[in-house]
Amino acid sequence: MRFWLKIYERNDVMAVVSTRKDTSALTLTFVAEFEASIERVWQVWQDPRQLERWWGPPTWPATFDSHDFVVGGQSRYYMTGPEGEKALGWWTITAIDAPHRLEFDDGFSGADGEPDPAMKPIACVVTFETVDGKTRMTTVTRFVSVEHLEQVTAMGMEEGMRGAMGQIDALLAAASH
């Protein structure tokens, strides 16, 4: 674990190259680039054990209880905070075009692990392409309203996603050794 923290703290290891909040389109977009093939970057989404190593900010690691990576498949996970608190979430996979596109709805869960109807889900589209010998991963999250976008942004989604995606470089580096 010490290795992961050391890698994450390095300023030169930051996968996210841009973030854009667009209130008129109701989107928050993250663009990250990795020194790995599209197929290898795809695996960090497909394999729940790899997904656990980066989904969630560094101080809120994720545990996936289920991850049915097929169209219509459900994922259930929780993130554990520094004080042991848990934030529960879910995904429903809505489209897969391996290894170039993944679409899913992402939301918060109640204490029972089921979707919380009080929180609207976020529609996510992740695309992968080769650019200048690197894999560019673009993640577009779409919200149902400006209020929804502002609510989730105020909860720290932008910083959390930047931190989470920043962990992918270390995961890819560890796998190549």
Image: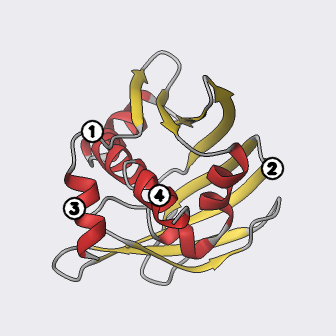
Look at the numbered disc 1 and give the secondary structure of its residue. loop
Q: Which residue is found at the position 60% from the left and 43% from the top?
A: 124
Mark 1–mark 3 distance (CA, rounded to whole Å): 12 Å
Q: Which residue is found at the position 41% from the left and 40% from the top?
A: 15
Q: Which residue is found at the position 51% from the left and 57% from the top?
A: 172
- Residue 164 visible in rendering: yes
Q: Amino acid at mark 3?
A: Lys
Look at the numbered disc 3 and give the secondary structure of its residue. helix
Horizontally, residue 83 falls left or right of residue 67, namely: left
Horizontally, residue 97 falls left or right of residue 39, namely: right
Name the disc covering residue 6, or none.
3
Horizontally, residue 176 falls left or right of residue 38, namely: left
Residue 174 in percent (x, y) is at 46, 65
Mark 1–mark 2 distance (CA, rounded to whole Å): 32 Å
Q: Are marks 4 and 2 in contact (CB under 8 Å)?
A: no
Q: Nearer the viewer, mark 1 or mark 2?
A: 1
Look at the numbered disc 2 and give the secondary structure of its residue. strand
Q: Quadrant of residue 67?
A: bottom right
Q: Which residue is mark 4?
A: 173
Mark 4–mark 2 distance (CA, rounded to whole Å): 26 Å
Q: Which residue is mark 1?
A: 12
Which residue occupies the foreground of this view, 44 or 152?
A: 44
